[in-house]
Every structure is written in structure tokens, then in C-alpha cells.
Amino acid sequence: MSVLSGALLGILEEAGVAVLTITEGLEPEEFFSSRFTQQEVLRQMSIMSDTAANVPDDLKLKMIEIDWAGWSILGIELKMAGSAERDALWFGVRSLVPATLMWMRVYRKDAPELFSLMT
């Protein structure tokens, strides 16, 4: 794999860890009552969706368990205002981010070359 692919996966992973760290232990009402927390999580999840969109197709095929289509849809929904954005944000926090990070851990263990920053 290319250095670019490894870098993109690193960015995806780093932003996902940030989301989980920021939201750890928060219930929906706590999360949505903190504008600062929401904005930072939205920023990190936007980084994730933009990064996922730039992952090369051949890498996506090697990592088929990651919900690449879900990231594409989430990226669109996060740009909306109102309840759609709110629902998408919470879905990402509680479902898409944890699932993505879980699969990335599996791939890092089973196929570390995918994450390589060496040529």
C-alpha cells in the first residue's frame, strides 16, 4: 500500500479516538447540551468522513468490513442543519465511529502493511 493510504488510515483513526475520548460516558442530553462538545465532535467526524471519502477504492476493497458507504452518507448528513444533523451526529458517535475503530484494530493486527508510512 502507499504512504498516502497509511496516512489516511492514521488520520481516520486519530479523529475517531478523539471522538470516543470527548464523548466517553456522555448521554445524549448531556452531549447535546454542550455546544462546544458538539462542535468539536462535528469537526472530528467531518475529518473522518472527508478522509474516508479520499481512501483509495483498492484499499476500501481490502477493508470491506468498514462501512465506507455509511461514512459517505454521514458526511452529507453532517452538513445539514436541524434534527437530521443531530441524529447523524449521535449515530456516528455511538455506532459508526466505534465500529470503524474496532475494524481498524483488527486490520492493524492482521494486515499492518495497510497502515505503513514507509514506501
Image (cartoon, rainbow, N blue to C red):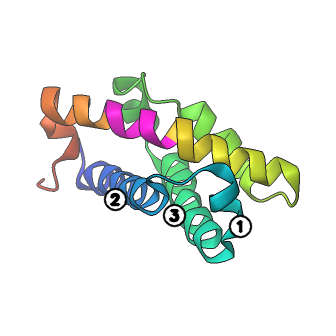
| Camera-side residue of 77 and 6 | 77
Measure the alpha-carbon separation of dots 2 and 3.
Answer: 9 Å
Measure the alpha-carbon separation of dots 2 and 1.
Answer: 25 Å
User: Going by the image, does 83 lie left or right of 40?
Assistant: right
Please identify, in this view, whether the residue under mark 2 or under mark 1 is nearer the observer: 1
**Dot 3, how many residues are within 10 Å of its Cα: few (below 14), some (14-19), or many (20+)?**
many
Residue at the spot of label 1 = 33
Q: Position of residue 65 (x, y in %)?
A: 42, 22
**Dot 1, how many residues are within 10 Å of its Cα: few (below 14), some (14-19), or many (20+)?**
few
Q: Position of residue 91 (x, y in %)?
A: 64, 40
User: Going by the image, does 107 lie left or right of 86?
Assistant: left
The reply to whether callout 2 and callout 3 are in contact (CB within 8 Å) is no
Residue found at x 59% / y 44%? 92
**Quadrant where the N terminus is found in the figure:** top left
Residue at the spot of label 2 = 14
Q: Earlier in the sequence, mark 2 or mark 1?
A: 2
Residue found at x 43% / y 54%? 24
Residue at the spot of label 3 = 44
User: Going by the image, does 71 lie left or right of 12?
Assistant: right
**Dot 2, how many residues are within 10 Å of its Cα: few (below 14), some (14-19), or many (20+)?**
some
Residue type at mark 1 is Ser
Q: Earlier in the sequence, mark 3 or mark 1?
A: 1
Please identify, in this view, whether the residue under mark 3 or under mark 1 is nearer the observer: 1
Q: Secondary structure at mark 3?
A: helix
Residue type at mark 3 is Gln
Q: Secondary structure at mark 2?
A: helix
Q: Secondary structure at mark 1?
A: helix
